[in-house]
Amino acid sequence: MKNKSISQSFFLIITILILSVYLSIKTDDFLTIENLYDVINSYAMLAILACGLFIVLISGGIDISFPAITIISQYIMVSFIMKHDGNYFIVFLISTLSGTALGLINAFIVNRLKVPSIIITISTLNIFYGLLLYITKGTWLYDYPAWFQEEIIFFKSTTATGFEYGLSFQFLLLLTVILLTGFIMNKTSIGRKIYALGGNAEAASRVGFNLLKLHLFVYGYMGFVSGIAGVVQSYTVQTVAPDSLLGYELTVLAAVVLGGTSLIGGKGTLSGTMMGVILLAIIQNGLNLLGISSYWQTVVTGLIIVFSVSMTAWSQRNKVGE
């Protein structure tokens, strides 16, 4: 299994390198600081959500509702600071608590009903979105406080053309979530229990694992990082549109399964997930730079999911054959 993980990582690295070389030859902008900096900031939210979905998939579940959780979290947060002002502590507190609460609802329903999580979270996706649109009437939010509109860049540098770059707010949040997720899954007992749960839920229950607590942690963490992703998107685009992330769940899912995480649980690495995010970002950015219609990005995302699932199924058949 370790060899298969190395093989998957090697394949991703080679693919990333080949695409990078191709795009650097075909376009003048791909390897520029401006483009790379923009890609990092633009795909920080995707990578953050991928960290949460990675844990859910490892546990043997799946969460489709996180785009709605992300939008609701940021809508509540932005509505508050528009009326009462505040600071970044308040921003993160409101958004992460909102996201976690919705994630815990998913966890409780999945655990109690014993229904496949994809059915539950598709249902809650529609419920959450429906309630949000009903309550907000589809109103966009964009009147942010001045302090939330200020660009935060550490170790700022400037290119010859006057473009400013450095350690951005989005990148620092992404780095924090990656480190936290890696610590949980590789250095804690709950991380090992999540892998065991995804490998065989019945066996995990027999040895005394509290499945409710594990589900609460897994889906609660997905809600937690969705709250952080909501802050990142609000900060990046400076607007909140209630339907802006419809369909985004497939893009995140594509990145995670492309990184080698199994859809049936128990197998996958965070490093592989991040490489999946990088590859998907390069593909989508490359399509834009080559002037290819954005509609093809949806087609490419679907093909990536089909390819990744096919590779997983092929790997499982080989394992059974051995």
Image (spheres, rainbow, N blue to C red):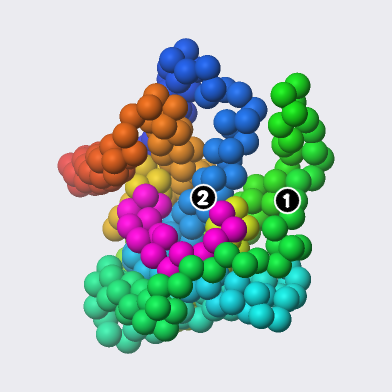
Q: Which mark is residue 283?
A: none
**Which amino acid lies under the numbered mark 1 shown in the image of this protein?**
Glu
Residue 34 horizontal/vertical position (percent)? 63, 30
The residue closer to the viewer here, 288 or 146, is 146
Q: Which residue is the extreme one toward the right?
A: 155
Give amino acid for label 2: Ala
In this rendered view, identify the residue nearer to me: 312 or 132: 132
Determine which residue is flagged by label 2: 47
Foreground mark, 1 or 2, reads 1
* The magenta stretch spans residue 250: yes
Q: Nearer the viewer, residue 75 or 250?
A: 75
Q: Hey, which quadrant is residue 133 in on the image?
A: bottom left
Which quadrant is the C terminus positioned in?
A: top left
The residue positioned 58% from the left and 38% from the top of the image is: 38
Residue 123 lies, with reference to residue 9, above or below; the image says below
Residue shown at the point (52%, 46%) measured from the top left: 43
